[in-house]
Image (tube, helix red, strand yellow):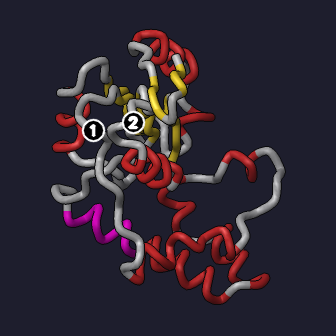
Amino acid sequence: FVLAAHDWGVFFALDLAASLEGSGAVAGVALVDVGWCYEDLAPSSVRLIAAYQLWLAVACRVGGLLGGMMATYGPHRALFGTPPALRRGGAGVSAESAYHYVHACDGTWIAPPPPHETVPCLFAYGAKKPVAFHSEGMLADVLARPHSKVIEYPCGHWVPTDAVGFTEDLASWLEGIPSRPCVGNNITIV
């Protein structure tokens, strides 16, 4: 199967891919706007990431109406814009939904490793935001993999909803990666 994820989903997808490494189950990973390599990020990016994540961690700890307002209308909206659900008149972000920022700030969340170097990878990101969640080293790593691609879109953080052509580019990449048989527990999945 192919794992496709955006934002914090990338961490969960990479964690799942790492746990399945060697099984042949993961045929590819499509990662959107968040990568895995932060060692060579610019210091200004590191400061911005730390500042907005700390704000959201505090919002989670505050909780309730005030925490929800902090999570919905905090300074991170200036960085990444209004979430698509809010643009459509949906509910705001709950303080509790920012739980992963608590773990990012207290050191209990460790970023998972990149997928195995033989796993095809699509990395798509929006170029119009003040901070990048990937490094040049990570982009080079992606491009060195077989059947892999990096796509930059002229949009912000909300690539899946705001990038013109994203769905078509994702479908095209999916069609181009080789299928893998998955063998395990005497069951073969093709």
Which residue, given by chain and number where applicable, does mark 1 sit on? 116
Can residue 153 be spotted in the picture?
no
Amino acid type indicated by mark 2: Ser
Q: Is residue 55 above or below residue 164?
A: below
The main secondary structure of the magenta stretch is helix
Coordinates of residue 95 in the picture (x, y in percent): 68, 75
Q: Residue 64 colored magenta?
A: no
Q: Is residue 30 above or below residue 77?
A: above
Coordinates of residue 6 in the picture (x, y in percent): 52, 44
- Of mark 1 and mark 2, the one earlier in the sequence is 2
Coordinates of residue 91 in the picture (x, y in percent): 81, 59
Q: Secondary structure at mark 2?
A: loop
Identify the residue shown where x is 65% and y is 51%.
Answer: 83
Which residue, given by chain and number where applicable, does mark 2 sit on? 23
Query: Which range of residues does the magenta coloring cover?
Result: 43-51
Q: Nearer the viewer, mark 1 or mark 2?
A: 2
Q: Indicate left or right for 42 with 55 as reference.
A: left
Identify the residue shown where x is 52% and y is 65%.
Answer: 76
